[in-house]
Image: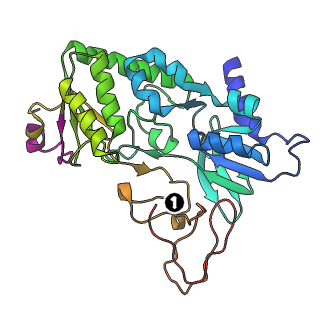
Amino acid sequence: SMAQTGANDRVGRAAMPPGPKMAGKRRVLIVGGGLAGLAAARELRGHFRVTVVDTKEYFEFTTGIMRAYVQPSHWDSLTFLYHEVLERNFGVGFMWGEVTAIDGAQKCAHVKTMFAKDGEEDVVQYDFCLIAGGCNFNLYTPSGESPWFPVVHNRWMDGQARRWDERFLEGRRRRILEEHNELQRLDDREANVLIVGAGFMAVELACELRHRFSRLKITLSDFLPRCLSPLSTVAAEYCEDYMRRNRIKTHYCLKYDPGSHAYWTALGLPGKADKTYFLSGVSQSNYFMPVNTLSDKGPGRGGWILTNRHLQVVIKLKDASVRPGKIAPGEQVVLNRGREPSDSP
């Protein structure tokens, strides 16, 4: 179809030969087209041949996404197609696909483009590589699925019955509408909605739901002693007061344990929740990175990229007597002999 042809054109443009102005310039591959990836592309485009690869065909301003669930028309103001902005406005390459592996020694990334067949991957060479893939905000499922970000990685989509493919702009739009309609039905039933987590995203979702759906019974729960733990006490007290005045129940120092009757009793929900949203903690999505560049510890059971003070990727040295190697992607820097990088993200 014409739509399929247009989509394939967008996928393949990053592989086109560079124009005269770009000839001889070193190549930068940016993995991830979120705020950090776009900022890097904008700043580097005049000095390097820049290519951005992302699993979605669109950018989504995630900070505003909670409003879209209660007011779907708001979503249009949060999104744009990557190829229109990156290629036409920024003048950089865009690949619609998923990075499956990065080879630091060969300075290349393996990318499964959107319409490639199983087993088919492009090998993209680079001189520098920036990892800006972000993270997930749900510790309770392997995919990290939450209202904050769509499920777009192929490894979590295989074998799962998903109604919409959120790697497409239209698929994401329909998923937002679907969630909105479900919330409307829950509101009609005066149903119980549980939000696991009490960070700014969870508080924002709770308040957005209350503003639009007056009959929902909303409960917010977290294992920490208060909401908005990274922020000041004054900010937390302000939000706590607002939620209580607007009939949003809050429970703290309570770990999510759906199989425990005591947990639901403590929440005042002996019949459990009709709908649960997870916005608790962070988990990495660095599965494409070499194992020896990832931490053994850290939030969400580790797996975070190890870096030095310059944000350059480093490798773990299990034996200090072993000659240190070089960082995985990007500019290669030899580590000092016998020094082991800190095992923290």
Tell me if 326 is positioned left or right of 16 in this view: left
Q: Quadrant of the N terminus?
A: top right
Look at 12% across and 43% down and name the residue there: 263
Task: Confirm whether the magenta stretch covers residue 310.
Answer: no
Q: Residues within 10 Å of mark 1 (few under 14, many from 20)?
A: many
The spot of residue 337 in percent (x, y) is 60, 83
The spot of residue 10 in percent (x, y) is 71, 31
Which amino acid does the dot numbered 1 rest on? Answer: Ile
The spot of residue 183 in percent (x, y) is 30, 19
Look at 43% across and 22% down and name the residue there: 68
Q: Which residue is mark 1?
A: 305
Q: Secondary structure at mark 1?
A: loop
- Asked if residue 1 can be seen in this view, the reply is no
Residue situated furthest bottom in the rendering: 321
Q: Is residue 127 above or below residue 216?
A: below
Q: Residue 13 is drawn in which quadrant?
A: top right
Task: Confirm whether the magenta stretch covers residue 251.
Answer: yes
Q: Residue 207 is drawn in which quadrant?
A: top left
Residue extent of the magenta highlight: 250-265
Residue placed most toward the observer, 12 or 133 = 133
Look at 50% across and 29% down and name the residue there: 165
- Asked if residue 243 can be seen in this view, the reply is yes
Q: Residue 231 is drawn in which quadrant?
A: top left
Look at 46% across and 47% down and name the residue there: 135
Tell me if 208 is positioned left or right of 31 in this view: left
User: Looking at the image, how many numbered discs can be counted on the residues?
Assistant: 1
